[in-house]
Amino acid sequence: MKTLIPVWDPLIRVFHWSLVFFFFVAYLLEGNRPNLHSQAGYTVLLLIIFRLFWGFWGTRHARFSDFVKSHRSALLYLKSLVDRKPQSHEGHDPLGGFMILALICCLFMTTLTGVILFGMEGSGPLANSSLIDFPGKAIEDLHGFFADLSVILILFHVLGVLTVSWLSSQNLIKSMLTGRKNKPQSK
């Protein structure tokens, strides 16, 4: 019988699903509803700022120190997946840790370029700021690039979650809803 243990605190779970919702609202409404697009984008930025804070001062499995591992440990974990014998981790596995960092960076760049664009249009906290002196087309292209790269990373993230869930016989999506995971097996 598998023992369920608490892993993901309520703030992490609310953050995760809120980020999913607001990113896709912003992404899907781009160009159609500019006000809603920018409001969803600002919400994503606030969520990312919260996650950075919670990554240093949050609960055990929310802290970066718990899941940011070496490249070597990520490669060993990848090998365990290829061998169909995934290493068991209480919190995030090493590849999941790298994915979190990649998503945070990419989403931050998406929102930063969005805030700059909004400021160039005369709105938001950078409206008419002398700090903004970028070619508009270049910032627009960067904004689109990081938004599209975020979608690609999200697809890899979902594929990774489904693969690890299947290989480890553990429903990781359910654990991000309930906050509980199967206790890792002792070797």
Image: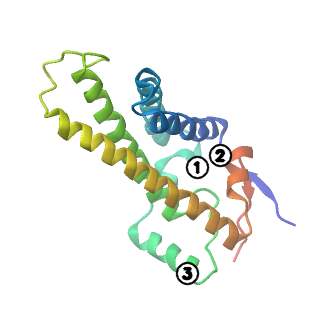
Front residue of 89/178: it is: 178
User: What residue does disc 2 label?
Assistant: 8
| Cα–Cα gap, marks 2 and 1 | 7 Å
* Closer mark to the observer between disc 3 and disc 2: 3
- Relative to 52, does residue 120 appear above or below in the rendering? above
Q: Amino acid at mark 2?
A: Trp
Residue found at x 56% / y 79%: 80
Residue found at x 73% / y 64%: 170
Note whether residue 159 is visible. Answer: yes
Residue found at x 50% / y 61%: 156
Badge number at residue 82: 3
- Relative to 156, does residue 78 appear above or below in the rendering? below
Residue 2 at what x, y percent from top left? 83, 64
Residue 40 at what x, y percent from top left? 47, 28
User: What residue does disc 1 label?
Assistant: 61
| Cα–Cα gap, marks 1 and 3 | 25 Å
**Tags 1 and 3 touching, CB below 8 Å:** no
Residue 9 at what x, y percent from top left? 65, 40
